[in-house]
Image (spheres, helix red, strand yellow):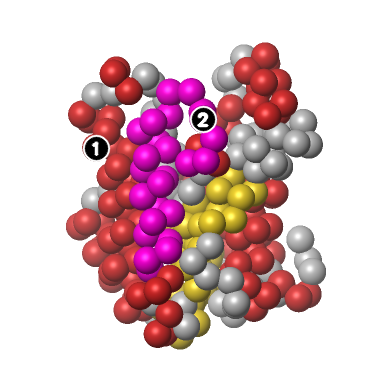
Amino acid sequence: MTTDILRLDGKIALVTGGSRGIGQTIVRDLVAQGVNVAFTYVSSEEATKSLEAELSANGRVKAYRSDVSDLTAIERLKAEIQTDLGRIDILVNNAAAFVAKPFADVSEDEFDQVFGTNVKGPYFLVQHLAALMSEGARVINLSSGATKVHVPFTSLYAASKGAVEQFTRLWAKELAERQFTVNSVLPGYTETDWMADLPSDQKRWMAEQADFKRLGSAEDVSRVVLFLASDMGRWVTGQHISADGGL
């Protein structure tokens, strides 16, 4: 995407969970718009380093191995970013854990994993990184269409994303003094690597749920993130924006 009005030259962004899926596309699109991008990952170090090297040819890109559910890791990440980059203009809370099970079968460990990554992570990232964020910074939280429509066996995941949407509303008020905008983006059924092993009939069912009768792409979601990150989104805050093709 090369529309000049969305150019973000010289901005500095942090994208959590940026090594794959929607997060990787957000990283790629931000780099294409002139942003210096830091992103976090937990596993797949070889693939992550390859992505980092590829994108560094077009801009400043740095990967940090960091588990956002771990407060010590967040504190370490803050120190590293302060040393390496100095500030953050755009924070995209994308890292997520997903469990699809009947609620009666969810274990305590699974509960802690999902809420640790999806709720604790964004909460303490914003709390700790706000001091590094510039006046007029953007906080963009990835939520999910699962908060507004019934997706079978996702009570744990949907509840965690519902918490993120409440954070969005309240942080928008608390951070307005510094001219921050805080918004959530809600993807629907989006075709990324997590769908690779799903049966074709299940994918067809997912596609049929959208008004446009197709699965979303990571680019469909990333373009909304780019809008919110750009100057075009400066008057939008405290909002939950669906990028789901009409679920």
> Mark 1 highlights which residue?
112
Using the image as rendered, state which of residue 194 and residue 51 is in the foreground.
Answer: 194
Viewport quadrant of the C terminus: top right
Res. 135 mark: none
In the depicted structure, whether residue 197 falls above or below residue 177 = above
For the point 27% across and 33% down, the residue is 111
For the point 54% across and 35% down, the residue is 149
For the point 51% across and 28% down, the residue is 151
Viewport quadrant of the N terminus: bottom right
Residue 198 place in picture, x, y as percent: 58, 19
Q: Is residue 239 visible?
A: yes
The residue segment tinted magenta is: 147-171
Relative placement, left or right, of 174 versus 88 is left
Using the image as rendered, state which of residue 187 and residue 36 is in the foreground.
Answer: 187
In the depicted structure, whether residue 186 falls above or below residue 167 = above
> Mark 2 highlights which residue?
150
Mark 1 packing: few (<14 Cα in 10 Å), some, or many (20+)? Answer: some
Indicate the amino acid at tag 2. Answer: His
Q: Is residue 62 visible?
A: no
Mark 2 packing: few (<14 Cα in 10 Å), some, or many (20+)? Answer: few
Magenta-span inclusion, residue 50:
no
Q: Main secondary structure of the magenta part?
A: helix
Residue 148 place in picture, x, y as percent: 52, 41
Kindly indicate the quadrant of the structure image that contains residue 129.
bottom left
Indicate the amino acid at tag 1. Answer: Asp
Q: Report helix, strand or loop for mark 2.
A: loop
Using the image as rendered, state which of residue 116 and residue 58 is in the foreground.
Answer: 116
Residue 238 place in picture, x, y as percent: 49, 66
Q: Are marks 2 and 1 in contact (CB under 8 Å)?
A: no
